[in-house]
Structure formats: C-alpha cells, structure tokens
Image (spheres, grey):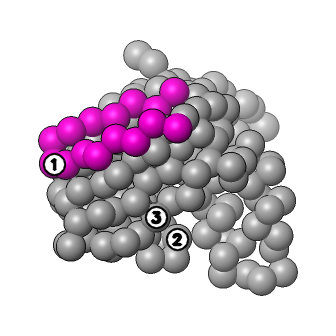
C-alpha cells in the first residue's frame, strides 16, 4: 500500500488512516473527472472528489486551436505530456519539439517550457504531474483568482513557485 495519510477524528480520538493509491476500479471518459476552466483551457483531473492520489496526478486538457501556455518554470513539480489529439509545439529550455498523437514529452522540474496547440482542430493532452496534487492546487488557486478580481494572480503564482519567463 502506498498513498497519503489522513487523520480521522471521532469521539475525541484521532485515528491515522492509510489511503490506498487505487482503492477501487476507476473509469473516466474523455474530459471526465475533477474539472477546472482556465480561460479557454479545460482541464479534468482523473479523480473523484474525496479520493486520494498516490505519487502523481493525471489530467486531461482540451485546448482550442491557437491556445498557448506561456514560457514558465516550476521547481515543485515535473510534467509528462502525452498528445491524444491534435498537434502541439513545445519549447523547452530553448529547444522546440513538435508533437502529434501518441507522442510524449517529459519536462524536468525547473526547465523553462511553454506550448501551444498548432492544429486546425482542438488538441487534447494527457498530462502526468509529480508529485500528486501540487499542480492541481496551483490550478484551483489560479481558477479562483481568475474569477475574483480582488485576488492577486501574481501572489498565487509566487505561492506555488510558478515563474513566468
């Protein structure tokens, strides 16, 4: 068993539970899971509310033609991108990679990177982010800041170690 630890309180006692990485069979269709909207980008983390994850997060993104993620870096998590549909140009530490369906790119922690959907149709990526929930916490905070003008998006980026290059 791997996973996270959680405490459960009841009747004045604190009991430690070990949450399994995969406690039960899980099935997700395209763009199903814990969903977020960041501008034109739609993200679906492949988990259900209340479920723990193990060593990594897995999410799918739907990106319209021309959608871009600006050049950035983050030391707290590593990303692996798998193209499901469409074409994407990635820029990683000054090197350009063009990927199509079935191709994969592993971005090391701290490497400056950005990408854009270059196909005429929407592109879909499956992304593995390690460790678990670090990127999702950033996405949740960014989504909240985008919908509430009183929140400072730069403070969110700084809090999560996300640096625009």
Which callout, 1 or 2, points to the residue nearer the camera? 1
* Front in this rendered view, residue 96 or 106: 96
Earlier along the polypeptide chain: callout 3 or callout 2? 2
Q: Which mark is residue 101?
A: 1
Q: Mark 3 or 2, which is nearer the eye?
A: 3
The answer to whether residue 105 is above or below residue 87 is: above
Residue highlighted by disc 2: 38
Disc 1 and disc 2: Cα gap in Å? 23 Å
Give the vertical position of 48 relative to 80 (above or below).
Answer: below
Q: Residue at x 80, y 49 (%)?
A: 159
Residue 68 numbered mark, or none = 3
Q: Report crowding for label 1: few under 14, some 14 to 19, many 20 or more residues within 10 A (C-alpha).
A: some
- Say which element carries label 1: loop
**Above or below, 121 relative to 10:** below
Q: Which residues are magenta?
A: 94-108
Q: Nearer the viewer, residue 1 or 97?
A: 97
Comes first in the chain, label 1 or label 2: 2
Q: Secondary structure at mark 3?
A: strand
- Residue 7 horizontal/vertical position (percent): 66, 33
- Per the image, label 2 sits on a secondary structure element best described as strand
């Amino acid at each position: 068993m791997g996973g996270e630890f959680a405490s459960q309180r009841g009747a004045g006692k604190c009991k430690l539970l070990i949450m399994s990485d995969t406690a039960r069979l899980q099935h997700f269709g395209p763009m199903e899971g814990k969903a977020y909207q960041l501008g034109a980008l739609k993200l679906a983390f492949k988990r259900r509310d209340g479920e723990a994850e193990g060593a990594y997060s897995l999410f799918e993104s739907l990106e319209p033609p021309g959608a871009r993620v600006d050049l950035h870096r983050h030391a707290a998590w590593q990303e692996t991108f798998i193209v499901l549909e469409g074409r994407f140009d990635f820029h990683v530490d000054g090197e350009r990679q063009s990927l199509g369906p079935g191709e994969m790119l592993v971005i090391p922690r701290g490497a400056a990177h950005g990408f854009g959907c270059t196909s005429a149709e929407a592109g879909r990526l499956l992304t593995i982010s390690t460790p678990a929930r670090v990127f999702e916490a950033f996405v949740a905070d960014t989504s909240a800041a985008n919908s509430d003008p009183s929140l400072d998006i730069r403070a969110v980026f700084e809090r999560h170690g996300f640096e625009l290059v």
